Amino acid sequence: MSLLLLRPLLPPRAIAALAVARSRGMKVYTKTGDKGTSQLFSGERRPKDDAVFQALGDTDELNAQIGVAVEQARLVNNDILPQRLEQIQSRLFDLGACVATPLTTASQSKQKRTGTFDDANVAQLEQWIDEMDLELPPLKCFILPSGGGLASTHLHVARAVCRRAERSVVPLVAAGDVEGVVQRYLNRLSDFLFVSARFAAVREGKEETKWVNQNIKPVKKAAEEKEEA
């Protein structure tokens, strides 16, 4: 497994140690996963389709999608979102380290080395949501995940991936392998990404695309049909 793929699985100290080893001649590929298994930070090997790796893969995809949104936000000189999103990307690495260290099988020493991931991270998201929401027009109907510019659209994609990552984590929390704060963080992060998508649209001066319910006729058209009848 390459150092790049190990990043979501390992805490910062372990990543640094691997980087040093690589600088001393360690190859990017190890071939240890060629038989369909991979190693957790705890040292335990599991099949690559294990629930833990599913959650880690979804979290990694989420991080990458947020990265696309960061670059799009920079292109339109959005001065707030890139900084906040990059902080979130770092927190997702921390979250991945927790997921890669199952509480039911990892030793106490391994758990301590992953560091802490607490509700302060959730509170930070809530603060940012409240701040951005003050600049947004009231949401009076459903909006489509399009029409607000590329940064906004990519944030909507990230929101959808975040929901999937949250669903992947739910059974791990239920099994006692992961702390509930991880699930809470992903739940709040999807809210943050939704508000961020709207915020990006406003900052670009784009108008959000409203959902049109085909079963509800516009008032004017309904009145005309009534007169014709």
Image (tube, rainbow, N blue to C red):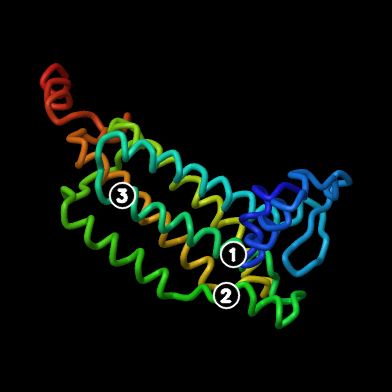
Residue at image position (55%, 64%) is 95
Q: Nearer the viewer, mark 1 or mark 2?
A: 1
* Amino acid carrying mark 1 in the image: Pro
- Label pair 1/2, CB-CB below 8 angstroms: yes
Q: Which residue is mark 2?
A: 115
> Percent x, y for residue 220?
12, 26
Residue at image position (74%, 75%) is 106
**Separation of disc 1 and disc 2 at Cα?**
9 Å
Residue at image position (46%, 65%) is 185
Please, is residue 107 above or below residue 124 in the view? below
User: 146 and 229: which one is in front?
Assistant: 146
**Separation of disc 3 and disc 2 at Cα?**
26 Å
Q: Which mark is residue 12?
A: 1
> Percent x, y for residue 72?
36, 36
* Amino acid carrying mark 3 in the image: Leu
Among numbered discs 1 and 2, the one appearing first in the sequence: 1
Image-based side of 151 in relation to 226, left or right = right
Name which quarter of the figure residue 145 lies in: top left
